[in-house]
Amino acid sequence: MTKGENEMNGITGEQFIQIALQLAGGMKAIGAGLAVLGMFGPGVGVGLAAYGAFTGMARNPEIKDHIGTQMIIALAFAEAIAIYAFVSFFLLKP
């Protein structure tokens, strides 16, 4: 084999592997960053749920126990989504 057949555009096989590994690490970092963005949605959702629950309790105090129970259940679901994003971040962390 000649030198031209062993190289691709001036890059040897070892250099190509190093570039591919660096690219994979960068893609993992981008994926971890996107996973962190997934934690902002549940945070906003929790705030809006609390706002709605407190507004409802202020308008109709007789059913505050029912509203409070429903709010706790909704907050648990929203926090579960944030936990999924948090775990995804640590699985993808470079």
Image (cartoon, grey):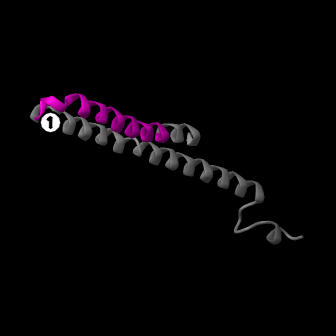
Residue 52: name its quadrant: top left
Q: Nearer the viewer, residue 14 or 24?
A: 24
Where the C terminus falls, by quadrant?
A: top right
Q: Residues within 10 Å of mark 1 (few under 14, many from 20)?
A: few
> Looking at the picture, which amino acid does disc 1 mark?
Thr
- Residue 85, placed above or below residue 19: above
**Residue under the point 52% across and 37% down:** 87
**Residue under the point 30% across and 36% down:** 70
Tell me where residue 72 appears, x and y as whole percent. Answer: 33, 32
Would residue 66 appear left or right of 57 to someone viewing this image? right
Spot the residue most to the front: 62
Q: Nearer the viewer, residue 7 or 63?
A: 63
Q: Is residue 65 magenta?
A: yes
The boundaries of the magenta stretch are 60-85
Q: Is residue 16 magenta?
A: no
- Report the magenta stretch's main SS: helix
Tell me where residue 57 appears, x and y as whole percent. Answer: 16, 32
Residue 59: name its quadrant: top left
Where the N terminus falls, by quadrant?
A: bottom right
Tell me where residue 47 appears, x and y as whole percent. Answer: 26, 37
**Residue under the point 47% across and 45% down:** 35
Residue position for label 1: 55
Residue 91: name its quadrant: top right
**Residue under the point 38% across and 40% down:** 78
Tell me where residue 23 appears, x and y as whole percent. Answer: 60, 53
Spot the residue most to the left: 59
